[in-house]
Image: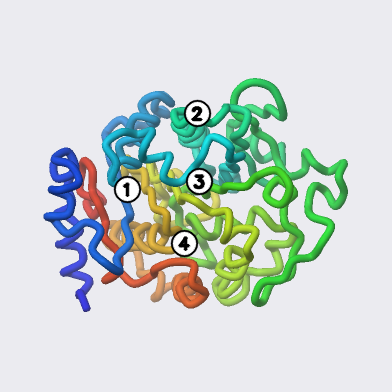
């Protein structure tokens, strides 16, 4: 088993130069070894600036990350590993407190268009229209281009836009958004990397609290095992194709509320087909930054991240660092500045 130090040292070796040499060179540096999952972290100064980057630039970087993750030579071939032109794709964003930047969701929608997916087959969504507007999203329920609306926009179907049936999964019993149940067949979790005052971390998996009607019930014990249980339901598990994390300017303390004094210009995007592994790498970034900033560890603050072990136990993905390979494109992922 790798030590944490060995893991970090090995992960640094998966550089952009190695990927530029193609799949053969990638295998040479250990990418894709049996039993290990990939998390790609792409970083660039364009992503670190206070002003949001242009969607076209974010798309370029997402395309590069997708090629590295999917071991393909072109962006279209990479995205086509996970999505098909006939799919209706739901991009679930997080609009509470410190939100996923609209530019990330829009760039992702544009990238999916590169495989022939019609723009109106992409739905960018969260709980409410009000929260989406507050986070800077332009609401569009129909027409050309990606659609964007909240669960409450389907309130005329009943239950405020949530399902007629109560779905159970482990310890939770909830109504799920009709956007998930009735409108989409493929799912992307597009989260933002930030500290959470109870769970320790909110990222790809906790983003799914926004698909149920009663997340307020499930915050005891650091939201464990509830975060894992929400994501373990087949409505999520069977639709989830990709996890994308907005780590442009993450927040290492004071979350999930918006606290600019604890945000920093990491300038990154994280991609993986394994949301658990992505969250595990995000947690490592968060922990390193907290140490560098002189903050106590999450364990010392009595809010350790418990839900990752539960998610792994439920077969949702990999939470063990020795089973994860991080591919750094650009600035090394563990350099938190």
Q: Position of residue 36 (x, y in %)?
A: 29, 65
Query: Which tag, 2 or 1, sits closer to the chain's start?
Result: 1
Q: Residues within 10 Å of mark 3 (few under 14, many from 20)?
A: many
Q: Which residue does the numbered mark 1 point to in the structure image?
A: 69
Q: Name the residue tied to disc 3.
A: 190
Mark with earlier residue (1, 3): 1
Number of disc labels:
4
SS for dot 2: loop
Return the residue at label 2. 116
Residue 122 shown left or right of residue 2 in the figure: right
| Residue at the image point whose x is 49% and y is 51% from the top | 241
Is residue 164 or residue 207 the one in the foreground? 164
Q: Tell me which numbered mark, 2 or 3, is placed earlier along the sequence.
A: 2
Q: Which residue is mark 4?
A: 201
Mark in the foreground, 4 or 2: 2
On the image, the x and y values in percent for residue 168 come to 72, 71
Residue pictured at 22% horizontal, 71% vertical? 4
Q: In front of the other: label 4 or label 1?
A: 1
Question: Quadrant of the image for the N terminus?
Answer: bottom left
Residue 6 occupies quadrant: bottom left
- Mark 4 element type: strand
Could you tell which of marks 4 and 3 lies nearer the N-terminus?
3
The percent position of residue 279, horizontal first and vertical second, equals: 42, 60
């Amino acid at each position: 088993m790798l030590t944490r130090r060995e893991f970090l040292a090995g992960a640094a070796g998966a550089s952009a130069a190695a990927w530029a040499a193609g799949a053969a060179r990638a295998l040479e540096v250990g990418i894709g070894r049996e039993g290990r999952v990939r998390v790609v972290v792409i970083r660039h100064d364009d992503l670190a600036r206070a002003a949001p980057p242009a969607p076209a630039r974010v798309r370029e970087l997402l395309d590069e990350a997708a090629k590295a993750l999917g071991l393909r030579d072109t962006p279209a071939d990479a995205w086509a590993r996970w999505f098909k032109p006939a799919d209706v794709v739901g991009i679930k964003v997080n609009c509470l407190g410190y939100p996923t930047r609209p530019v990330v969701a829009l760039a992702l929608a544009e990238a999916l268009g590169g495989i022939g997916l019609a723009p109106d087959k992409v739905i960018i969504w969260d709980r409410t229209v009000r929260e989406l507007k507050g986070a800077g999203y332009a609401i569009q329920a129909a027409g050309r281009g990606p659609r964007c609306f909240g669960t409450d926009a389907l309130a005329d179907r009943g239950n405020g836009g949530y399902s007629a049936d109560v779905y159970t999964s482990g310890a939770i019993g909830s109504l799920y958004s009709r956007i998930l149940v009735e409108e989409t067949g493929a799912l992307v979790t597009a989260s933002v990397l930030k500290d959470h005052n109870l769970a320790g971390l909110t990222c790809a998996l906790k983003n799914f609290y926004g698909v149920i009607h009663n997340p307020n019930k499930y915050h005891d014990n650091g939201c464990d095992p509830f975060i894992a249980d929400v994501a373990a339901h087949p409505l999520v598990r069977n639709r989830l194709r990709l996890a994308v994390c907005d780590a442009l300017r993450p927040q290492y303390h004071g979350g999930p509320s918006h606290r600019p004094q604890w945000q920093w210009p990491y300038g990154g995007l994280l991609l993986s087909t394994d949301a658990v592994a992505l969250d595990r790498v995000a947690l490592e970034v968060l922990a390193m930054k907290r140490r560098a900033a002189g903050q106590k560890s999450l364990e010392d603050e009595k809010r350790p991240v418990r839900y990752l072990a539960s998610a792994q136990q439920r077969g949702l993905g990999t939470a063990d660092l020795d089973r994860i390979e991080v591919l750094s494109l650009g600035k090394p992922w563990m350099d938190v500045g």
